[in-house]
Amino acid sequence: MRILEKDYWKKIPQWKNVSRWEWEDWRWQIRNRLKNIDEIGKVLGKDLSKLKKVEQVFRTGTTPYYISLANDFSDLENPILKQILPSCEEIDPFIQSEGNFDPFKEEILSPVNGLTHRYPDRVLLRTTNFCSVYCRHCMRKRIFLEEERARRYEDYINMFKYIKENKQIKEVIISGGDPLTLPNRKIEFILENLQKIDHVESIRIGTRELVVNPYRFFDEGLLEILERNDKVWIVSHFNHPDEVTDVVKRAVKNILSAGIPVLNQTVLLRGINDDPETMEKLFRSLIQVKIKPYYLFYCDPTKGVLHFRTPIDKGIEIIEYLRGRVSGIAIPTYAVDLPGGLGKVPLEPDYIVEKTDQYIIFKNYEGKTVRFNRCKFDIIDTKKSEDLCL
């Protein structure tokens, strides 16, 4: 966990006169977002004009808090900046040729506007296309092409009606954009309508505000809403250990005090976190602030994102490295989300070296092997062993 210096943002010329009260106001962070390459270039002290051609296709945006985490503004390969700054690779037709703006058919699998029903027992609500930071690896990068807007109340009402009429739906995932950029009254409207549907057992809010604007969870109004709606889980999206700060720890403490559990989904990203040591540090940092690593996702086949992809085996290598080195609660499930809306497939290292009708040979995290007889007792005497296997 990173400990940020007191008033650390004052070292950045653009914010040297910003008070702590302003900086820790989530609304101030959103109002003062850097919304284009020129504004980001001024903060970094760099000419980024060559990236404007990317910005003509995919919009740019970041909170002051999130860009301040980069520390070294001279290094554009910094893992924070690589998640903020556009890259010409995003619009390279050769690199992105196999990508799709909607690889999981979210729009096609939408029985009502803004709702995706891919799995029998759960639905996804896309409540807004606005984010306080536009992550370059976003799996819904098609929203970068649209005007920033939230859904209309009529859309939400149609979603609730669909959920009420389909009693096999047990879980609702609230996503966007980022749903926690919505005003409290709209969040309250959504949650309270879902909370009172009896067959809905759990509500997941997928948000990156905990990463890019953790002050959102300093808002007493939001915390009171979360506390009243006890079906809610928060699913955050940390990709690098530099994102896990003492501010995040304070925010998570507030969430937990409202009775809401916090999980995390990480995306495997080339040049950002695609090495075992970085992932180990990230997952240890998350556990330190009481966030449970939930998923490690292989980077999705979204147009504009393919330059972040690694070999699929890289994720298996990372999970294998972690096993035995960190606590089991710090190890996420590595998964690939299959194109065409076919769902997530978990991938794990293979710890079975050999398998026969009589025995299985396992390999542990150190590479040591052990033989397990398939019958109930491991008895050396062959004849007795065969008798017990009957």
Image: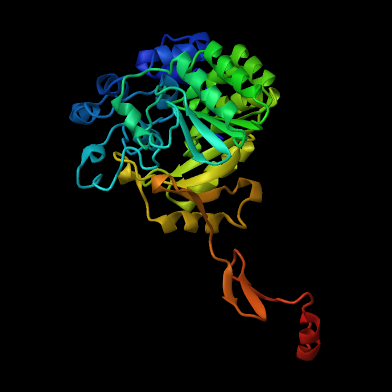
Question: In which quarter of the view is residue 170 placed?
Answer: top right
Residue closest to the far bottom? 383
Whether residue 210 is visible? yes
Q: Residue 61, how many percent across, how many down?
A: 35, 23
Q: Residue 351, how many percent across, how many down?
A: 58, 67
- Colour logic: rainbow
Q: Residue 348, how many percent across, how many down?
A: 54, 58
Task: Report the number of numbered marks.
Answer: 0
Q: Quadrant of the N terminus?
A: top right
Q: Nearer the viewer, residue 202 or 307?
A: 202
Q: Is residue 357 above or below residue 114?
A: below
Q: Residue at x 49, y 33 (%)?
A: 243
Whether residue 327 is visible? no
Q: Residue 248, how many percent across, how many down?
A: 56, 27
Q: Is residue 92 above or below residue 45?
A: below
Q: Residue at x 20, y 41 (%)?
A: 92
Q: Nearer the viewer, residue 242 or 228?
A: 228
Question: In which quarter of the view is residue 291 placed?
Answer: top right
Q: Residue at x 41, y 12 (%)?
A: 31
156 left or right, relative to 84: right
Q: Is residue 367 above or below residue 32?
A: below
Q: Quadrant of the C terminus?
A: bottom right
217 left or right, relative to 23: right
Q: Nearer the viewer, residue 158 or 29?
A: 158
